[in-house]
Image (cartoon, rainbow, N blue to C red):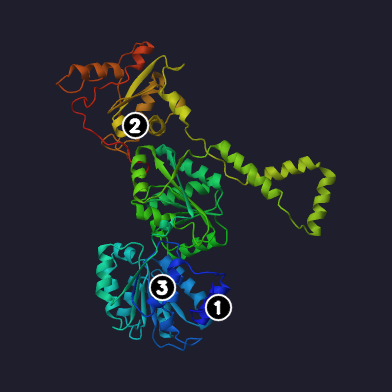
Amino acid sequence: MSFEHLPSPLAQALEAHGYSALTPVQAAVTEAEAAGRDLVVSAQTGSGKTVAFGLAMAPELIGDESALPFATAPLALVIAPTRELALQVSRELQWLYAPTHARIATCVGGMDPSRERRTLQGGAHIVVGTPGRLRDHLERGALDLSALACVVLDEADEMLDMGFREDLEELLDATPENRRTLLFSATMPKPIEALAKRYQKNSLRISTVGENRGHGDIAYRAVAVAPAEIEAAVVNLLRFHEAETAMLFCATRDNVRRLHATLIERGFTAVALSGEHSQSERNNALQALRDRRARVCVATDVAARGIDLPSLSLVVHVEIPRDAETLQHRSGRTGRAGKKGTAVLIVPFPRRRRVEMMLRGAKINAEWAEVPTPEAIRAQDRERLLETILAPVEPDEADLDIARTLLEQRSAEELAAALVRAHRAALPQPEELLSGSDAGRAQAAHRPGFDDVVWFRMDVGRRQNADPRWILPTLCRRGHVSRQEIGAIRIAPNDTWFQVPRAIADRFAEAVRRTADPKGEDENGIHIEAAPDGPREMARDNRRGANDGPRKFQRNDGPRSNDERRGPRRPHPAGQRPQGKPHRKGPQGAR
């Protein structure tokens, strides 16, 4: 494609950067219809918006000149919601405007404000920054907006969501009346409409959201796991895909810190990004990803917008995003600029229905699959290992000399085995997850070793999405026992009973007590208590309709038959529960 309609310096920069054609949003903002007008642009993440507004504001900055003259005050202002996005925008504009010798100043929180003021006083053609820092410079007199020809609001919807309305209004009120206003936003809620109406004149609306809905190059997958096995699922997903760069999203700083520590312990090269990290730490983490010193980034949603890592091919939603928009913004870190990417949602069993609704609302067709097993991971390792070792190489004479020495002392088969062992030693070991067969055995009838058991009860059932696949890991975590120490599991509409060998029942009960809050519940609101009478006797009392409250549990020291231990399939008639037991929602996943 020819760039003849673009200013010559920018056309040169695009060609030098490997551009052969403009993306849809870049082409739209450079059409003759958009020239000189205020713009309201809707485009998905990864569509090339930074270059788009760089091209759109070029006529006001460059005109017919090939280089920009010295500027005593900025000609363009770009406002972004986060430090990471502002720094990325600045880097993109640096190469795009390099042939014009433009001076670009970046003003963001966490950086030295006095150095930023000196840069502004020395003359800058384009200023890029976050709302709070730009407002601070404006109020201190360091930022002069009197000569501004163009202002860009990047990710405007995010800035309003983050509470920057007053900062934006103060900055925009300080700009000249005749300046162009370019408003870029992934969505167009009412606050954005109001902002455009107040600060724009005769604006042109451009939307490229409908084209593939921003995820045509992203393959979505979802895996359902027990809440207690989310971290193990993360390990196996990373090992199975072995992405050059992967980004894992958590909901809180604490969870980022915990998962990052877990991955480092497992042998992954990982960095963390969250609000608790300084700007210097964030910059170092991103640089480690760019130069391949780290391959995994664990982040909160602060990193969901604006971070561009060309090698990023895998995004894992470790914790479910709060809405479909967040899902798309997180996933949009991969599958950019025509490259293929994969986004995986890790879904706790009780929350599968909610995720399915979110995916339908976002019109995303996700493939539901099992978490990769150790066997599948080793099969993938074998293929990758063969491909790596058999790749053509051009050894120098020193390498060949060592190879000859090795062949004199060892056979070719022994050397090949040592090479394979060295490659495998560097790989973190996959995790064993609870399989469907394990869960089935836990719900099956009596097993050897469970001749003398104590029944326990937890106050969730089928109506709260109770399932052995997440119940069993929960019991192991709460009671500090192994899977083999949990016997039959009986799931009723609102309750679940399970067996524990009498020899460890007291230890199990004490561990459950220690892992509960003052109300006797865990973080998911689940209460576990001893129920020595078992499900059959409890169901009999419920059917009798005892109105004096729930029957007190009595320990029965004598063993019962297998039939008595198993009890009926439905302890409660539909809709009926022991009196005094409030209805409780099921767990909401690991937090």
Q: Earlier in the sequence, mark 1 or mark 3?
A: 1
Q: Earlier in the sequence, mark 2 or mark 1?
A: 1
Instruction: Identify the amino acid type marked 1.
Output: Gln
What amino acid is found at the position of numbered circle 2 in the picture? Answer: Ala
Asked where in the image residue 397 lies, by quadrant, the reply is bottom right
Dot label at residue 29: 3
Quadrant location of the N terminus in the rendered image: bottom right
Of discs 1 and 3, which sits in the foreground?
Answer: 3
Q: Which mark is residue 371?
A: none
SS assignment at label 1:
helix
Q: Which residue is mark 2?
A: 466
Q: Residue at x 34, y 11 (%)?
A: 558
Q: Position of residue 68 (x, y in %)?
A: 47, 86
Mark 2: secondary structure: loop
Query: Mark 2 against mark 3, which lies toward the viewer?
Result: 3
- Marker disc for residue 12: 1
